Image: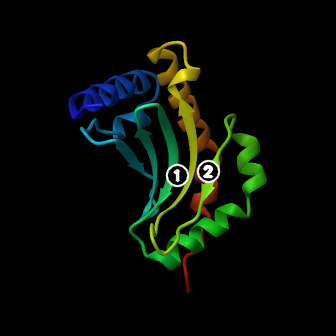
Amino acid sequence: MSSDERYQFWTELIEKASSSDSYYHGFNPRRAGAIQQRTGIPGISLCFRLRSRYTQVTLTIENIGFERSVHFFEQLYQHRQQIEEGISVPIEWQPANEKTKSSRILATLQFDNSPSIEEHYELMIATMDEFREILLPYINQLQDLK
């Protein structure tokens, strides 16, 4: 997918999402493969990622150091059952390691499973809405390293 196609994809997604929820005005279209919105906690963001065969909705913890990333991830992981029950698609838990230093909770949405791009946008938006509803209360309770 070219950078122009990615920009068009993000523009269409944001327009569709922001027509019913002003939260999505905080996302900006880019030529890159991901766009993000901050959560209010430094280093923790909610992201959309675009790949050739799928998209992802993620909670990403990055740029705060390996130990802090793992510390925040482990606190969220303690609520794994409640989080997974509140999100209607399967999610994957990826803790930071020395190589990546980023932790992620992610949902992968295959293009093949959507009959149209419009329906795929709707699935992405619905999944992000679930991430916000379920994860933000836990994010707001995170305790930093002492």
Q: Above or below — where is 10 with respect to 41? A: above
State the residue at coordinates (39%, 26%). Answer: 13
State the residue at coordinates (62%, 64%). Answer: 141
Residue placed most toward the observer, 64 or 1: 1
State the residue at coordinates (40%, 27%). Answer: 18
Q: Is residue 113 left or right of residue 83?
A: left
Query: Quarter of the image containing the C terminus?
Result: bottom right
For label 2, count other residues whose C-alpha is less than 10 Å away and answer few (under 14), some (14-19) or many (20+).
many
Residue 145: where, in percent of width, then height? 55, 81
**Residue wearing tag 2:** 135
Sooner in the amino-acid sequence: mark 2 or mark 1:
1
Report helix, strand or loop for mark 1.
Answer: strand
Q: Are marks 2 and 1 in contact (CB under 8 Å)?
A: yes
Residue 12: where, in percent of width, then height? 34, 22
**Residue wearing tag 1:** 59
Query: Quarter of the image containing the N terminus?
Result: top left
Residue placed most toward the observer, 21 or 68: 68
For marks 2 and 1, give the one nearer the viewer. Answer: 1
Q: Above or below — where is 60 with respect to 142? A: above
Quadrant position of residue 115: top right
Q: Above or below — where is 118 with respect to 13? A: above
Q: Is residue 45 left or right of residue 141?
A: left
Residue 75: where, in percent of width, then height? 66, 68
Residue 114: where, in percent of width, then height? 55, 19
Residue with the most extreme top position: 115
Q: CA distance from mark 2 to mark 1?
A: 8 Å
Query: What's the amino acid at mark 2?
Result: Leu
Q: How is the image coloured?
A: rainbow
Numbered label tally: 2
For label 1, count other residues whose C-alpha is less than 10 Å away and answer few (under 14), some (14-19) or many (20+).
many
Query: What's the amino acid at mark 1?
Result: Leu
